[in-house]
Image (cartoon, rainbow, N blue to C red):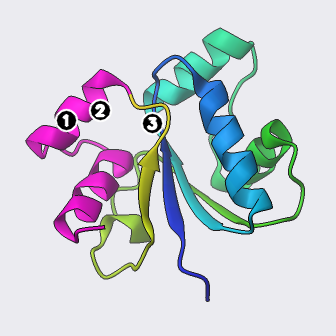
Amino acid sequence: MTTPLIVGITGASGLIYAVRALKFLLEADYAIELVASKSAYMVWQAENQIRMPPEPDQQEQFWRQQAGVSTSGKLICHRWGDIGATLASGSFRTLGMVIIPCSMSTVAKIAMGFSSDLLERSADVQLKEGR
């Protein structure tokens, strides 16, 4: 099993950076565990007039289509509210986490240790585990 990298996507403007990062990582054959915040859904729709699907299996197809990568790499998507997902546990081994784009609200919550969703909890775990 390949050790995954967590990719978090927040509601900061600049979601094209997330798409480009996913394209690069998937084409480089990384295993990706992806979680988009609730705000990311709203900003994506406002900026692109495209609705991001809420279900993880539909999200995989959506993100692959946006990145233009059909089969390379491994992509597993998670619901932002699923605080009990594997990503929320320190025993779940990862390469680390990147949040792109990262809103200032998310930066502040992570810095203060305030976890209200899976993305923030995952970041807290990565910091705690020194990843």
Give the percent coordinates (x, y) of residue 102.
40, 31
Secondary structure at numbered mark 2: helix
Look at the image and give the residue range highlighted in magenta: 103-131
Q: Residue at x 41, y 71 (%)?
A: 86
Q: Which residue is mark 1?
A: 109
Q: Earlier in the sequence, mark 3 or mark 2?
A: 3
Secondary structure at numbered mark 3: loop
CA–CA distance in space, label 2 to label 1: 5 Å
Give the percent coordinates (x, y) of residue 9.
50, 38
Q: Are marks 2 and 1 in contact (CB under 8 Å)?
A: yes
From the viewer's side, name the closer residue of 130 and 116. 130
Left or right, 38 with respect to 89, comes to: right
Q: Residue at x 74, y 63 (%)?
A: 28
Q: On residue 106, which mark appears?
A: 2
Secondary structure at numbered mark 1: helix
The relative height of residue 110 versus residue 126 in the rendered view (above or below) is above
Q: Quadrant of the C terminus?
A: bottom left
Q: On residue 37, which mark appears?
A: 3
Residue 77 in sight from this viewpoint? yes
Three-letter residue code for mark 3: Ser
The relative height of residue 53 versus residue 131 in the rendered view (above or below) is above
72 within the magenta span: no
Q: Quadrant of the N terminus?
A: bottom right
Q: Are marks 3 and 2 in contact (CB under 8 Å)?
A: yes
- Give the crowd class for mark 2: few <14, some 14-19, many >=20 residues within 10 Å: many
122 within the magenta span: yes
